[in-house]
Amino acid sequence: MLRGLRALLAGLVIFAADPCRANEDSSGTTDFISSWLAMVERTQAEQPRWITPLATVTPRLEQEFRFDLFSESLTTHGRFNNYGGGKGIEFIPTERTEVFFGVPPYDTRTSAGGRLLAEGWGDWPVFLVKYRFLSANEDSGNYVVTGFFQLSAPTGNAAFSNHFYVLQPTVAFGKGWGDFDVQATVSEQFPTGGDHTAESNFGHPVLVNVAAQFHLWDVLWPELEANTTWWPDGTKGGKVQLFLTPGIIFGRFTIRDRIRLITGVGYQLSVSPAAPAYRNNVIVTLRTTF
């Protein structure tokens, strides 16, 4: 099955890069890929052309490979590094939907003196499904409204795992005015299927993310995000954690036809009085659309 999936993905990349070459390889598979990519082109033309923010999940439907890097300065003055960011592959199977399959991140934690305390795989972000309810491109209203549902599984190293599954329904929306846009998500996390004490301590955090972007010179997207978590219950019940994330994204740089490169960097800073999970965080993102 994995070999078959790799072969299909390789075929998609080849087709996106060089349709003529794909036609030489021929048959029903090529016809299917051609029809599918034409559908993707149509559905993306029906929504704004904004770029995906660094931390806020976009309400747009995307099709890309993505790898992120987080480097967090902990309140203990140690450091936590996350390689991958729980990202993976996103693709558009139908005109109003997107499916994301995540890859578990690789995590390391070091002490203030630089001593390695723990390393290993984090929990698996199994999938995220989007359904786009409303959308209009820049010529027709410049907005989008989408619903998400995400699942993560406790497959990670004991030092990094939640030890339970997390279900996360989300409402996302965005509005643009010329070269300026705002994208936002509101979601709640529900722990289940694991250690009851850990679930109770985790609670049901509510996450609100808002990203404001400006588009400059075709390939520059400076942005400012507010990333907020409120705990109505659990060990942090009543607390609010707020991070501000200024950053800039570069792209989309055309490699060939539908294949484009996007990269970006941001600095996340804790500004809430409640004890944050970390003091600050450097975010780096690398994406290839197809």
Image (cartoon, helix red, strand yellow):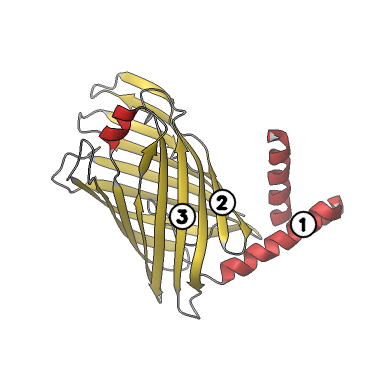
Secondary element at image label 3: strand
- According to the picture, the residue beneath numbered tag 2 turns out to be 99
Q: Are marks 1 and 3 in contact (CB under 8 Å)?
A: no
Whether residue 10 is visible to the viewer of this picture, yes or no, is: yes
- According to the picture, the residue beneath numbered tag 1 turns out to be 32
- According to the picture, the residue beneath numbered tag 3 turns out to be 148
Look at 74% across and 56% down and name the residue there: 33
Give the mark nearest the N terminus, 2 or 1: 1
Q: Which of the 4 image quadrants contains residue 200?
A: top left
Q: 248 or 236, which lies in front?
A: 236
For residue 33, above or below residue 42: above
Look at 39% across and 36% down and name the residue there: 192
Q: Which of the 4 image quadrants contains residue 106?
A: top left
Q: Which amino acid does label 1 sit on?
A: Phe
Residue lying farthest to the left in this orientation: 273
Whole-percent x, y for residue 117 in the image: 32, 19
Secondary element at image label 1: helix
Q: Is residue 123 left or right of residue 270?
A: right
Whole-percent x, y for residue 46 in the image: 56, 72
